[in-house]
Image (cartoon, helix red, strand yellow):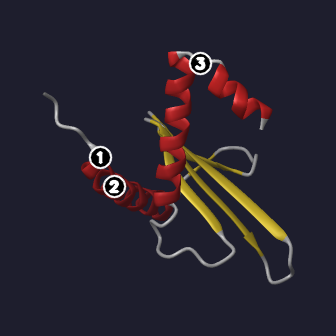
Amino acid sequence: MRRGLLGLIIPKSSDERRSEAYRVVLRECAKIGGTVFGPIPKGTRREFFCLDENTWIWHEEWTGTDKVHHVRTTRYDIRPHGVFKAQDGQPYQPLSKEELVTLYRAATEYNRMINEFAAPHLVPAA
């Protein structure tokens, strides 16, 4: 609460505002990306997003039938010599052809969805 009030009293720098805006957009894109593979089951959180030109993130949280909370994060790195993934802190490993096709389709659908979402918000250049 105090921190929020200080934000109102003490103006943020343009870098801070830009960083905050980037985080807000990234969170919204991640939510949209979470629906790439269809509806999200109740009690599940899914996010899929492009972190930068070479990195994609898939994050999922759910509570199993055993009432245990599960979290899985997969990072996909696109490198000159292939596409690699690391899951939950494990070492990087190359994607199989099947996984590569799935990632490509997901990224294509993500880009379509993000462009569709962004189109009404874009202001034409004057």
Mark with earlier residue (3, 1): 3
Q: Residue at x 75, y 30 (%)?
A: 3
Within 10 Å of disc 3 (Cα), the crowding (few <14, some 14-19, many 20+) is few
Image: 102 above or below 84: below
| Residue 126 position in % (x across, y down) | 13, 27
Q: Residue at x 81, y 84 (%)?
A: 65
Separation of disc 1 and disc 2 at Cα? 8 Å
Image: 113 above or below 5: below
Give 102 or 56, whichever is nearer the viewer: 56
- Which of the two marks, 1 or 2, is nearer to us in this view? 1
Q: Residue at x 47, y 74 (%)?
A: 38
Return the mark for residue 117: 2
Image quadrant holding the N terminus, namely top right
Give 67 or 11, whichever is nearer the viewer: 11
Within 10 Å of disc 1 (Cα), the crowding (few <14, some 14-19, many 20+) is few
| Residue 60 position in % (x across, y down) | 65, 62
Amino acid at dot 2: Phe
Give 14 or 35, whichever is nearer the viewer: 14
Separation of disc 3 and disc 2 at Cα? 30 Å
CB atoms at circles 1 and 2 under 8 Å apart?
Answer: yes
Within 10 Å of disc 2 (Cα), the crowding (few <14, some 14-19, many 20+) is some
Give 63 or 94, whichever is nearer the viewer: 63
Q: Which residue is mark 1?
A: 121
Give the secondary structure at mark 1. Answer: helix
In the figure, is residue 80 to the left or right of 94?
left
Q: Which residue is mark 3?
A: 11
Return the mark for residue 93: none
Mark with earlier residue (3, 2): 3
Give the secondary structure at mark 2. Answer: helix
| Residue 103 position in % (x across, y down) | 45, 57
- Which of the two marks, 3 or 2, is nearer to us in this view? 3
Amino acid at dot 1: His
